Amino acid sequence: MRAHTHSSRPRGLLAIAAALGAIAAGAACSSDFVKQSQIEQLRVLGVQADPAELILDGGTLPKTTFTALAVEPSGAPITTQFAVCLIDTASGLPPANLDCPGDAGYTLPDAGAYGATLDLADPKLQAAALPFFTADGGPSNVDGGLQAALAQGVPLVVGFLALAPPGGNPDGGPPATTGYATQRLQGIATITLRTRDDKNPLNHNPALHAISLDGVAIAADGSTTVKVNHVAKLEPVPESDAKEETPDAGLEKLTYSFFATAGDLDALRTTDTTATGQAADTSNQWTAPATPQTVQLWIVVRDGRNGTGWITRSVTVVP
């Protein structure tokens, strides 16, 4: 192995990126016909990286923390695992059964509930990626192609796995995932690795301040009530700094995904900007269930640049 130098360090990073960046596997999904907005079993509704990008600044190797919004409506315990996906992409797209986390991934150290840390300075990660380097260390033009690729941004791919026991719901479900003794959900998330650019500041994750129900913020303590079968207007309330300027001097387009454990949502997603650039209505219609119960609601916001945030609230449905 050649000695590390100032010029070879970014080259090694891009070799890792080249080994990972072509992965296009999607998250595992169910074959049933339950609406995507309806939460009846183990789901991962979003994955956030904080910070939202990996920025190379003066040769410093960056790190970030991934957190999964993993939910299970019965309250059954959930475990999660993250891994950098390592695969030889020279032959094209990876197999559909990519084992990451697993044999095709480098497991990342835990960082709190449902989280893990990706640190590009981790020597074990670098060693794990070495077998997937091309003979010349990846893109070979250090002064041209390498820097150009990093300036544009190179996607790194991280796989996640969520597990929960079966039979947690009052009716005995949901069942275990076919072929496993548990509920199992596997998928991927991406993060961009790029060089610092004063004209393109670090992207921050958008945040939500509240969920409005018929014009009133749902209480964080769960004390908000609605009548059975009530048709309500749900609307995300973003923080004042949720929308950032993009490198082309425009503004981010925020997209919202809605989820609930009961009742009926009219749409899975809304957006704050139309295809022609006009302001759009971000509200969604939710019909409360016909029986009294506590309903959990989630809204996930994405900024189109791998920035992700979310908010969770609950309401009590009364007769």
Image: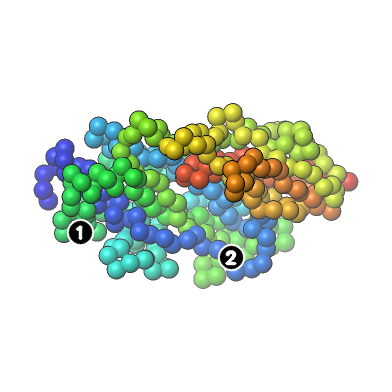
* Label 1 – label 2 distance at C-alpha: 37 Å
Instruction: Return the residue nearer the eye: 171 or 250.
Output: 250
Task: Say whether marks 1 and 2 touch (CB < 8 Å).
Answer: no
Q: Residue furthest front?
A: 276
What colour scheme has been applied to the protein in the rendered image? rainbow
What SS does tag 2 mark? loop
Q: Position of residue 154 (x, y in %)?
A: 34, 48
- Which disc, if any, is residue 30? 2
Marks 1, 2: nearer the viewer: 1
Residue 261 appears in the picture as rendered: no
Between 82 and 282, the one nearer to me in the picture:
282
Residue denoted by label 1: 134
Residue at left 20%, top 46%?
144
Q: Is residue 228 above or below residue 30?
A: above
Q: Amino acid at mark 2?
A: Ser
Q: Earlier in the sequence, mark 1 or mark 2?
A: 2
x, y percentage for residue 311? 62, 39
Point 64% across, 68% down: residue: 32
Where residue 151 sits in the image (x, y, percent)?
31, 42
**Which residue is at 59% across, 28% downward?**
240
User: Which residue is at the front of the view, 114 or 77?
Assistant: 114
Q: Position of residue 67 (x, y in %)?
A: 48, 43
Give amino acid for label 1.
Answer: Thr
Q: Is residue 218 above or below residue 257?
A: above
Q: Extreme bottom residue here?
A: 179
**Most extreme residue toward the right, as rendered?**
319
Examine the image and state in which quarter residue 225 appears: top right
Callout 1 environment at 10 Å: few (<14), some (14 to 19), or many (20+)? some
Locate residue 127 relative to residue 184 in the image: left or right. left
- Dividing the picture into quadrants, the one containing residue 283 is top right
The residue closer to the viewer here, 166 or 316, is: 316
